[in-house]
Image: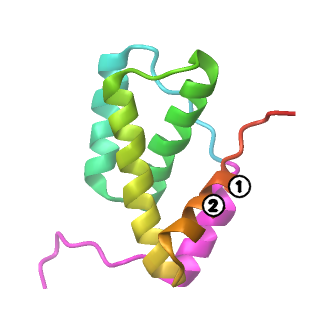
Amino acid sequence: MDDTVREPLSESKARELLGEMSEIQESLSKSWKIRSRKNQERLASGDPLQLYQVYRGLLELRSQKGSLNNSDRKQLALSLELLTEELAVALDQSPEQVKELLERTTALDAA
């Protein structure tokens, strides 16, 4: 087996990650170039925690600014797609169920 291939996320690790998600708060760089480069590195890692950091950070940025630039929108969509696929397999749920779960987990303070 190739050492560069990451093991799929286990159900217990997926549940652990979901539990940690609401506590993750990281501000993204205001410079779109720096933010894009850092997010691209995180997306390339494939690590579910880093995928979530991209997803959460860009959702927060969109909430603050009202919209995202093209690069940010693409990275947001990709982070959601990759994270959804990973969690759906680990939790044996449909992608739609996982997206709903992510939306509830990442609900930004709207109250």
Element type at marker 1? helix
Count the labels in the image.
2
Q: CA distance from mark 1 to mark 2?
A: 6 Å
Relative to 95, is 74 above or below? above
Which color scheme does this rendered protein use?
rainbow
Res. 100 mark: 2
**Residue 18 rendering spot, x and y as whole percentages:** 63, 64
Coordinates of residue 106 in the picture (x, y in percent): 66, 48
The residue sitting at the left extreme is: 2
Question: Is disc 1 in contact with disc 2, using a CB cutoff of under 8 Å?
Answer: yes
x 50%, y 51%: residue: 52
Please state the extent of the stretch shown in magenta in the rendering. Answer: 1-23
Q: Is residue 22 magenta?
A: yes
Q: Is residue 58 above or below residue 47?
A: above
Apparent side of residue 45 relative to residue 108 in the rendered image (left or right):
left
The type of residue carrying mark 2 is Glu
Q: Would you place residue 73 above or below residue 107 in this image?
A: above
Alpha-carbon neighbours of circle 2 within 10 Å: few (<14), some, or many (≥20)? few
Q: In the current view of this chain or complex, which residue is farthest to the right?
A: 111
What amino acid type is highlighted by mark number 1? Arg
Residue 104 numbered tag: 1
Residue 109: x percent and y percent? 78, 35
Q: Quadrant of the C terminus?
A: top right
| Rendered image quadrant of residue 60 | top right
Q: What's the residue at 28%, 42% (across, down)?
A: 41
Residue situated in front as seen by the camera: 2 or 87? 87
